[in-house]
């Protein structure tokens, strides 16, 4: 098992706690500037409840990071699947919630927002989560189980859970099964990051937490809420396309 070269477990924990403190301080600052109306109070309580799961994932990730338990778990996992095992399904499943969301739009399933707003929030959420994740990768310099670098946290897992949380927020009121299915794909992505020996358990747990809280914050603040040039446009088709070696979108405007 390769040695883990980090700036020290304490420094990693401090950096993560700083990120958490920053994220939650944004929520508190926002709540203090809002009028004390019932709707705002309900919205704040809702965000607090939704923060429990990602905060727990991040906290658990901090606890097991660089622990003997984490190393033994990874060794046991690889022994069960075989040291030569590699199945790159995680490279594709991280995008599954995005495909689900736009496919549901195409099929006419009612969503919380217009497709342009969905795209807007999806991009902003991924920008926030990926910035946090890649910053931590550079700070910690944690070695991967397979000997690579920049292990902490898992970028694939962060992306998958960010996408899954966006899907959930858009369809949990109108299509519950669809909304939760994104988390199934995200959890499978995180699992295969460990099975493929690319990440440790703590990398996956914290990546999942960062992805969820980033998307929840975006849906709490709703940035650029009134910016949507396509609100009154009904003759547009917008569907994702995924090939073996390329990704893109199918966009059609009917005159």
Image (cartoon, helix red, strand yellow):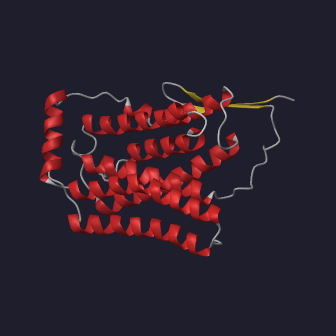
The answer to whether residue 82 of the structure is visible from this angle is: no
Residue 152 x %, y %: 31, 53
Residue 13 x %, y %: 28, 65
Residue located 44% across and 50% down the image: 211
Judge from the rendering whether residue 239 lies leftward or rightward of residue 178; answer left or right.
right
Q: Is residue 6 above or below residue 196?
A: below
- Of 57 and 125, nearer the camera is 57
Residue 179 x %, y %: 52, 36
- Of 223 and 129, nearer the camera is 223
The answer to whether residue 85 of the structure is visible from this angle is: yes
Residue located 48% across and 46% down the image: 162
Q: How many marks?
A: 0
The quarter of the image holding the C terminus is top right
Residue located 16% across and 54% down the image: 67
Q: Is residue 33 above or below residue 113?
A: below
The quarter of the image holding the N terminus is top left
Q: Residue furthest front?
A: 38
- Of 134 and 129, nearer the camera is 129
Judge from the rendering whether residue 234 lies leftward or rightward of residue 221; answer left or right.
right
Q: Is residue 252 above or below residue 207?
A: above
Residue 47 x %, y %: 51, 58
Judge from the rendering whether residue 158 lies leftward or rightward of residue 11; answer left or right.
right
């Amino acid at each position: 098992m390769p040695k883990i070269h980090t700036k020290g477990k304490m420094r990693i924990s401090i950096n993560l706690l700083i990120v958490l403190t920053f994220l939650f301080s944004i929520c508190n600052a926002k709540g203090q500037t809002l009028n004390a109306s019932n709707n705002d109070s309900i919205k704040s309580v809702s965000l607090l409840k939704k923060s429990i799961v990602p905060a727990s994932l991040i906290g658990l990730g901090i606890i097991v990071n660089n622990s003997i338990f984490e190393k033994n778990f990874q060794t046991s996992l690889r022994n069960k699947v075989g040291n030569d095992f590699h199945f790159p399904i995680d490279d594709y499943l991280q995008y599954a919630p995005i495909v689900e969301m736009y496919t549901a739009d195409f099929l006419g399933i009612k969503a919380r927002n217009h497709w342009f707003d969905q795209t807007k929030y999806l991009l902003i959420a991924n920008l926030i989560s990926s910035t946090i994740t890649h910053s931590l990768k550079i700070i910690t310099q944690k070695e991967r189980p397979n000997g690579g670098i920049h292990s902490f946290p898992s970028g694939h897992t962060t992306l998958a859970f960010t996408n899954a949380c966006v899907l959930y927020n858009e369809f949990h009121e109108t299509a519950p099964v669809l909304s939760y299915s994104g988390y199934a794909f995200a959890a499978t992505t995180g699992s295969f990051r460990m099975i493929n020996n690319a990440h440790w358990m703590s990398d996956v747990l914290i990546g999942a937490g960062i992805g969820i809280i980033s998307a929840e914050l975006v849906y709490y603040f709703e940035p650029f809420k009134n910016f949507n040039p396509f609100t009154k446009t009904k003759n547009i088709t917008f569907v994702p396309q995924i090939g073996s070696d390329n990704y893109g979108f199918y966009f059609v405007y009917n005159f």
